[in-house]
Image: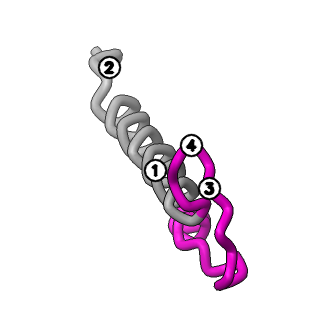
Amino acid sequence: MLLVALGIPWYLPPDLTILAFGFPLWALISLVVAFIIALFTAWLYLVEFSDDET
C-alpha cells in the first residue's frame, strides 16, 4: 500500500517543472515506483510457486 501511495506524487508542489532524464519529475517517480511494484509482484510470485517443496 505504501508503494502505491508513493507512486502517486501528490506530495510534490503543483508548479514543479523539474525535468529528470527528459521526463517531468512526477512522471519519473511514477515510472520508477511502478517498476518497483512489478519487481515486488514478480518476487512474490516466484516465492509462492517455487518448486522447492517436495
Question: Residue 53: which disc?
Answer: 2
Whether the residues at callouts 2 and 4 have beta carbons within 8 Å, the answer is no
- Image coordinates of residue 10 in percent, x first then y, are 62, 80
Q: Position of residue 39 (x, y in %)?
A: 44, 38
Q: CA distance from mark 3 to mark 1?
A: 23 Å
Q: Is residue 27 left or right of residue 51?
A: right
Q: Which mark is residue 19?
A: 3
The residue sitting at 57% across, 57% down in the picture is 29
Above or below for 44 versus 29: above
Q: Are marks 4 and 3 in contact (CB under 8 Å)?
A: yes
- Quarter of the picture holding the C terminus: top left
> Is 50 colored magenta in this rendering?
no
The secondary element bearing badge 2 is classed as loop
Residue behind mark 4? 21
**Numbered disc 1: secondary structure:** helix
Q: Which comes sooner in the sequence, label 1 or label 4?
A: 4
The amino acid sitting under disc 4 is Phe
CA neighbours of label 1 inside 10 A, class few (<14), some (14 to 19), many (20+):
some
Marker disc for residue 37: 1
In front of the other: label 1 or label 2?
1
Is residue 7 or residue 22 the one in the foreground? 22
Circles 1 and 2 in contact, beta carbons < 8 Å: no
Local packing at callout 4 (Cα closer than 10 Å; few below 14, some 14-19, many 20+) is: few
Residue depicted at x 61% and y 66%: 6
Magenta extent: 1-25
Quarter containing the N terminus: bottom right
Of the numbered discs 1 and 2, the one sitting upstream in the chain is: 1
Q: Secondary structure at mark 3?
A: strand
Q: Nearer the viewer, mark 3 or mark 1?
A: 3
**Residue type of the residue flagged with mark 2:** Glu
**Counting residues from the N terminus, which is met first, the one under dot 2 or under dot 4?**
4
